[in-house]
């Protein structure tokens, strides 16, 4: 018989193992193949990059984002992510990346969604512009049930 905590611990151990494998593949395969491809593509003229000859490292700065994993308990893990950001322990970019996303892609997409909803007169509870501007963002949520520990 397992409970939430033991299931989560086991899953986190598995994920750490797979993250190690992902890091190994990125460093020892993907990055090397990308660097070789970039060199060949620019030397052959198939890819024209300004200042590649003088600043090749500028073009080799890629950020590999491995796949993320689904949450075990989305509500608890979202609250934990918010708290980690508020406490300065993680960045939004880290949280998004851990879930297989890219903040540089997420933010413009989110902005476009909010603007489209506003143009159509739609209001969603995820639209931060609908909240009072003078209200403070705090760790306290309106839903007090999040603070209770789960027992199984």
Image (tube, helix red, strand yellow):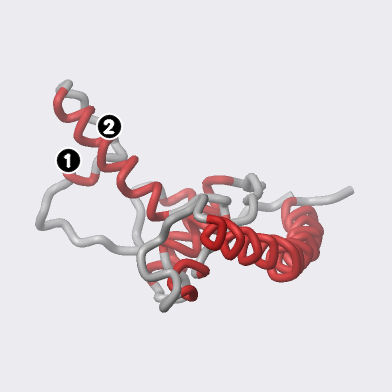
- Asked whether, in this view, residue 74 is left or right of residue 13, the answer is left
The quadrant in which residue 25 appears is: bottom right
- Taking depth in this image into account, of 34 and 26 the one nearest to the observer is 34
Residue at position x 52%, y 69% from top? 60
Give the image location of residue 77, x and y in percent: 55, 54
Residue sitting farthest toward the top: 120
Q: Residue furthest front?
A: 44
Q: Which residue was labeled with disc 2?
A: 124
Q: Could you tell me which secondary element the residue under label 1 belongs to?
A: helix
Which class describes the residues within 10 Å of circle 1: few (<14), some (14-19), or many (20+)? few
Q: Residue drawn at (42%, 68%), measured in percent from left and top? A: 91
Is there a contact, CB below 8 Å, between mark 2 and mark 1? yes
Let me know if residue 38 appears in the view: yes
Front in this rendered view, residue 113 or 66: 66
Q: Residue at x 58, y 65 (%)?
A: 39
Q: Residue furthest right?
A: 1
Question: CA separation, marks 2 and 1?
Answer: 8 Å
Residue at label 1? 130
Pointer 2 local density, CA inside 10 Å: few below 14, some 14–19, many at least 20: few
The dot on residue 150 is: none
Secondary element at tag 2: loop
Q: Position of residue 26 (x, y in %)?
A: 69, 64
54 displayed left or right of 42: left
Q: Quadrant of residue 131?
A: top left
Q: Nearer the viewer, residue 82 or 96?
A: 96
Q: Does residue 99 lie above or below 24 as drawn?
A: above
Is residue 8 or residue 96 the one in the foreground?
Answer: 96
């Amino acid at each position: 018989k397992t409970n939430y905590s033991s299931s989560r611990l086991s899953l986190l151990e598995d994920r750490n193992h797979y993250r190690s494998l992902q890091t190994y593949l990125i460093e020892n395969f993907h990055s090397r193949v990308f660097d070789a491809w970039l060199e060949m593509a620019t030397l052959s003229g198939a890819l024209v990059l300004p200042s590649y000859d003088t600043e090749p490292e500028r073009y080799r700065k890629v950020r590999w984002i491995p796949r993320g994993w689904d949450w075990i308990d989305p509500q608890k893990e979202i609250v934990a992510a918010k708290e980690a950001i508020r406490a300065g322990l993680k960045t939004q970019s880290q949280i998004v990346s851990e879930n297989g996303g890219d903040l540089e892609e997420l933010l413009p997409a989110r902005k476009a969604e909010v603007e489209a909803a506003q143009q159509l007169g739609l209001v969603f509870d995820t639209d931060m512009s609908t909240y009072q501007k003078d209200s403070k963002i705090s760790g306290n949520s309106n839903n007090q049930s999040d603070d209770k520990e789960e027992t199984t």
